[in-house]
Image (cartoon, grey):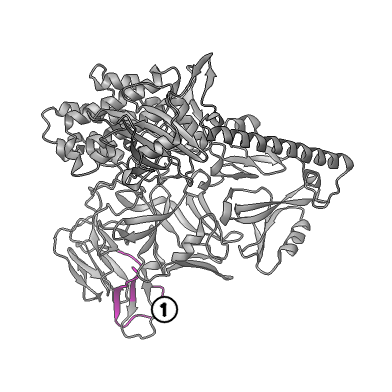
Amino acid sequence: MLIMVRSFFFCLISSLSIQGTLTITPNDSIQGNKTLVSASGTFEAGFCTFGNSKDQYFGIWYKNISPRTYVWVANRDAPVKSSTAYLTLTDQGDPVIHDGSGSGVTLWFSNSSRTANKPIMQLLDSGNLVVKDGDSSNGKFLLESFDYPGDTFLAGMKLRTNLVTGPNRSLTSWKNQEDPGSGEFSYHIDAHGFPQLVTTKGTSFFNRAGSWNGYVFGGVSWQRIISLFSFSLVVSDKEVIYQYENLNRDTVSRLFLNSFGVAQRLIWSHNRGWEAISNRPADQCDYYAPCDVNSVCNVANSPKICACLEGFVPKFHEKWSSLVWSGGCVRRVNLTCDGDTFQKHTGMKLPDTSTSWYSKSLSLENCETTCLENCSCTAYANIYINGTGCLLWFDDIVDMTKHSDQGQDIYIRLAASELDHIGNNQSFDSKKLAGILLGVVAFTIVLGLATFTYIKRKKLAERGVLKIFHWKYKKDKEDVELSTIFDFSTISNATNHFSDNNKLGEGGFGPVYKGVLKDGQEIAVKRLAKTSEQGAEQFKNEVMLMAKLQHRNLVKLLGCSIHQKQKLLIYEYMPNRSLDYFIFDSTQSKELDLTKRLQIIDDIARGLLYLHQDSRLRIIHRDLKVSNILLDNNMTGKISDFGLTRTFGSDQIEANTNRVMGTYGYMSPEYALHGSFSTKSDVFSFGVIVLEIISGRKNRNFQDSQHHLNLLSHAWRLWIEEKPLEFIDDLLKDSPTPQEILRRIHVGLLCVQQTPENRPNMSSVVLMLNGEKLLPDPSTPGFYTGTYHHSIQVESSSRSSGAYSQNEATVSVLEAR
């Protein structure tokens, strides 16, 4: 998972030895390498600088977490220019940073009416920097840093919104990755109407987490969240207070608002570092009102994520048909305020409540009555997910999102004529009843025919005819047949009855076994697992396609077999397994010298060129990755696993799908985010593979130790810094032909550019690899971690290394521009 955190900002302290103290008084100071440390050593505070700037800041960070992770910067908007800066307390207890020349910056002023006799500054184990009176035993603080949030929300901290005077305590992002000054994004409680958690960009909503549902702010998969944290929202006549606590005292957590407006809830793991368990925005529907008004957003329907509510139609039909959602939706029939009714919508993130009215005591029935009595009321719902309280909306419905199993119910007001098709309170006339009876009879007949056909085809399949999938078909008057249909018992015997000793690995399709036929031919057998999400369609897709494809750089499909529910694919056996077995293993990678790696890159390029251009149909692989590159006896690379392929006609350029399938780390941005795929999607995957082969490192979960960039971003940074040879595998660094390596890195970066138009096609790639074509300058790669965060869940055709090893698909968390 790609997590953009600010842990890569190192505090630059002049001395390696750090002297810590527990408290400071007006007679003490913090300067240079001296720091303030919490009692248990959890947090540490001191001076530091960021990036290339020499400006001095006073910050707080986790003492024992590396790389250093900041949670607060005191003088973020007033840096001190002098390296002799120091922090001390006034006699009244006000913290002051001096620049060493007599002037300075007072961080906070005490609002207390009394003067502290013996002010003491202390850093608590919660991360709260406090000032208290040493002579007082009441435990109250004169000042605390938690009242002045930065960009990090810690357990025990409170976000307050004052309902009387107006100002709120909010998280504020940094200006950029190297400037902790106040940025343009703010994270706070919006208390207009019923309280809701929002992120604003300037004065406009950027993301709206939703209203309080009794456990958390809605719009997030909250059942896991509440197993880790306890959240509270206190609403009074004067203020709204929001905070959270860790349920496990050993949990180290924080919520971090990055400079791109993405709020990440993170948990520290000693094995995995900072792990994001939630992100806002997480997908296209998480941005504020992406579908405008009177609509619902559902990312599961990508790319058509927006739909008008029932009873509404697009305001601009042509724009909506082009997936431009501006204008939203308008009523098909205006409300009359007489006889109006309500349409129930389930599983929703409730819409914007900034102009809502609410009552914690009204029942849902009384809530409906109250809404009907007000002609301006357009919707109602329970406040809390347990079915209590009343929320009313007026005018347009804004920013409502489908939230499946963890959303809430809402009732949208419609003119009575819009609900004629709902028969809760309507009687059926004779024509409707006759229509229903006719439909039942027709359904029964169809069901009977389908059952008969299924039983007949099942018997045929058991005889080995395999017509259940129509393995023989006609296309352009040309017969296409699979070369061999194997008897199931033959394959069972060849694999020693699918013995675990013969098992080579397991993928999304199912387990893979090595077998030996009676004539001594070695084979690899894919067996469709009963639990596999890849069923008949992918099985059929691979068999029908591979029966027609013949190329030295494609794995050869020898045949298939079906027996009852057993479905098998039989391939030529690849003794050297899959490419990832070699390049990602410190021992096996020694078998791949530069010559072999360059040859494998060329093999993949030629195989992909055949799919895109030289075969009769243009074929998009859609799941190209190193685990789907198999190696024969001579280490020749061959593309495998064609279960997700799509075929294009000669004049077709691209297509879209509502079901994004593939493997995280290899999918192109336009496919992962919008479901749009083309030959350029495969080119992106090829570019990732090239960079992995040259570097010997996985794109998935890679982070360079200094900048915490993913593999593509790391390669790009080294390229623009004119240090590309630092990117290569250590085993290749003594290569006598570095220009060959540089050319592959250059081609790889060209292939992974953000937009498909900038990527070369495979015919150009082959010429570039052979040095027969000039290489243009590459631009920023896709998913560049300096600028992109999103969350897309994807499916993989194979959780394994092609046919031979384990490689699970994952959820990608990307950053939004």
Image coordinates of residue 33 in percent, x first then y, are 17, 64
Question: Mainly helix, strand or loop, the magenta region?
Answer: loop
Residue 227 seen by the camera: yes
Kindly state the secondary structure of the residue where label 1 is placed.
loop
Nearer-the-camera pick, 751 or 453: 453
- Whether residue 186 is situated above or below residue 226 in the rendered picture: above
Image coordinates of residue 169 in percent, x first then y, are 45, 62
Image coordinates of residue 28 in percent, x first then y, are 21, 74
Image coordinates of residue 768 in percent, x first then y, are 27, 21
Left or right? Give the position of 277 relative to 418: left
Q: Which residues are magenta?
A: 106-131
Bin the neighbour count of mark 1 within 10 Å (Cα to Cα): few under 14, some 14-19, many 20 and up.
few
Residue at 32% x, 72% y is: 125
- Whether residue 123 is situated above or below residue 507 in the rendered picture: below
In the picture, the quarter occupied by the C terminus is top left
Nearer-the-camera pick, 502 or 668: 502
Quadrant assignment, res 163: bottom right
- What residue is shown with label 1? 113
Residue 77 seen by the camera: no
Residue at 46% x, 65% y is: 227
Residue at 66% x, 54% y is: 410
Nearer-the-camera pick, 521 or 403: 521
Magenta residue check for 266 = no
Left or right? Give the position of 511 relative to 777: right
